[in-house]
């Protein structure tokens, strides 16, 4: 959240659908991100880019350089966002508290479900250690079903290949070989 709060309008590149992550908001200050890997280019979906464009226009109308800014033009403080999310949780009557940080877990899990290579996920999430990225990946029922389907497909391919190897005439008759 601190990384996003520090994004300045000039750092949003619409052409490459990206933004530079150079600093973060922490205790009212703007220090560099927590680690070397956290200083990065953040890639954006088309929807995220459109949202940032709208926020940038709003920030400019407030004469703020920060995309996520207060009415005073200062960057949004992460604590205030957390407080607003906590209030929304209470107002909605949720038993389990939903946190802003849960979005990172959702992002990592959705990347995994889309079969994005773990190394790419690591870079997109700003991690410099793959073990940190793995903490953000969660298995769900769809992922498990897909894994079983892949296993079944591979087992069928191996059975078919054994059949062809056992009965060479099938190979020429059905042209299974490559």
Image (tube, rainbow, N blue to C red):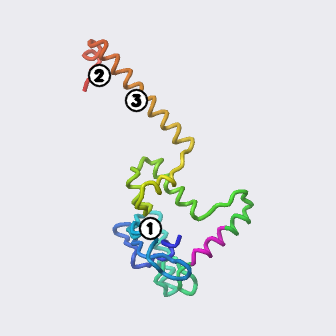
Crowd around label 2: few <14 · some 14–19 · many ≥20 (10 Å): few
Closest to the observer, 117 or 133: 133
Q: Residue 39 at x, y = what percent?
A: 40, 70
Q: Residue 11 at x, y = what percent?
A: 39, 76
Relative to 154, is 111 above or below?
Answer: below
Q: Residue at x 37, y 26 (%)?
A: 157
**For residue 165, what is the image quadrant?**
top left
Q: Which residue is mark 1?
A: 49
Q: Which residue is mark 2?
A: 176
Q: Which span of residues is magenta-colored?
A: 77-85
Relative to 130, is 86 above or below?
Answer: below
- The secondary element bearing badge 1 is classed as helix
Crowd around label 3: few <14 · some 14–19 · many ≥20 (10 Å): few
Mark closer to the chain start, 3 or 2: 3
Q: Residue at x 44, y 67 (%)?
A: 49
Q: Which residue is mark 3?
A: 154
Closest to the observer, 68 or 154: 154
Q: Considering the image in quadrants, where does the C terminus appear?
A: top left
Closest to the observer, 61 or 140: 140
Mark closer to the chain start, 1 or 3: 1
- The secondary element bearing badge 3 is classed as helix
**For residue 81, what is the image quadrant?**
bottom right
Asked whether residue 81 is drawn in magenta, I would say yes
Crowd around label 1: few <14 · some 14–19 · many ≥20 (10 Å): some
Asked whether residue 42 is drawn in magenta, I would say no
Main SS, magenta residues: helix
On screen, residue 177 versus residue 27, left or right, reads left
């Amino acid at each position: 959240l601190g990384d996003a709060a520090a994004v300045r309008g000039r750092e949003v590149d619409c052409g490459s659908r990206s933004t530079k992550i150079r600093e973060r908001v922490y205790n009212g200050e703007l220090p560099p991100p927590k680690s070397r890997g956290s200083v990065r280019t953040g890639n954006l979906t088309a929807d995220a880019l459109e949202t940032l464009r709208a926020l940038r226009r709003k920030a400019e109308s407030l004469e703020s350089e920060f995309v996520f800014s207060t009415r005073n033009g200062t960057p949004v403080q992460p604590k205030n966002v957390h407080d607003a999310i906590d209030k929304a949780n209470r107002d909605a009557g949720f038993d389990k508290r939903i946190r802003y940080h849960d979005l990172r877990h959702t992002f990592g899990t959705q990347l995994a479900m889309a079969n994005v290579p773990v190394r790419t996920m690591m870079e997109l999430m700003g991690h410099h250690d793959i073990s940190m990225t793995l903490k953000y990946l969660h298995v769900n029922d769809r992922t498990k079903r897909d894994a079983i389907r892949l296993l079944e497909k591979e087992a069928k391919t191996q059975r078919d290949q054994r059949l062809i190897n056992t009965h060479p005439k099938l190979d020429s008759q059905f042209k299974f070989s490559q």
